Amino acid sequence: MILWPGPLKNVTVSPDARWIAAISAAGIHVWDALTAQERVRIPEAVTRPLVGPWNQSVAFSPDGRFLYSFHRHERSVLVWDLRQL
């Protein structure tokens, strides 16, 4: 079970069910689905401070290698290579 002290938005699971990603006020988080250990945190300041975390969503690539973060107000997409994080 993943415990987080605040609200999470846009919780999504990678196609291979290995990773769980979500957005919080602190940024984008990626957890190992088997151990519930947080493996990656992309701080909100890095993701897009002006639009805020609640105007974003995340999705995995079909092979689970990349995480995409979509920014509604900026109409932009950032691509995160999970092997590099």
Image (cartoon, rainbow, N blue to C red):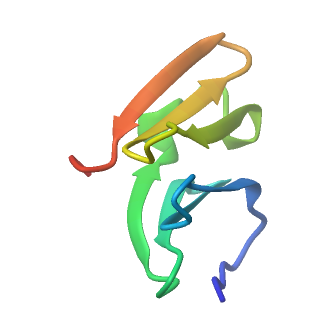
Residue at coordinates 51% horizontally, 59% vertically from top-left? 16
Residue 74 in view in this figure: yes
Quadrant, the N terminus: bottom right
Of residue 78 and residue 62, the one placed in the foreground of this image is: 62
- In this rendering, is residue 75 above or below 47? above
In this view, 24 is above or below 34? above
Q: Please tell me how many numbered marks the rendered image carries.
A: 0
On the rendered structure, is 38 left or right of 28? Answer: left
Q: Position of residue 75 (x, y in %)?
A: 66, 10
Residue 73 location (% of width, % of height): 73, 15
Tell me the residue at 54%/20% (across/down). 77
In-front residue for pair 30/27: 30
**Whole-percent x and y of residue 40?**
38, 61
Instruction: Report whether 12 appears left or right of 66.
Output: right
- Residue at 48%, 67% (x, y): give it: 18
Is 47 situated left or right of 80 in this image?
right
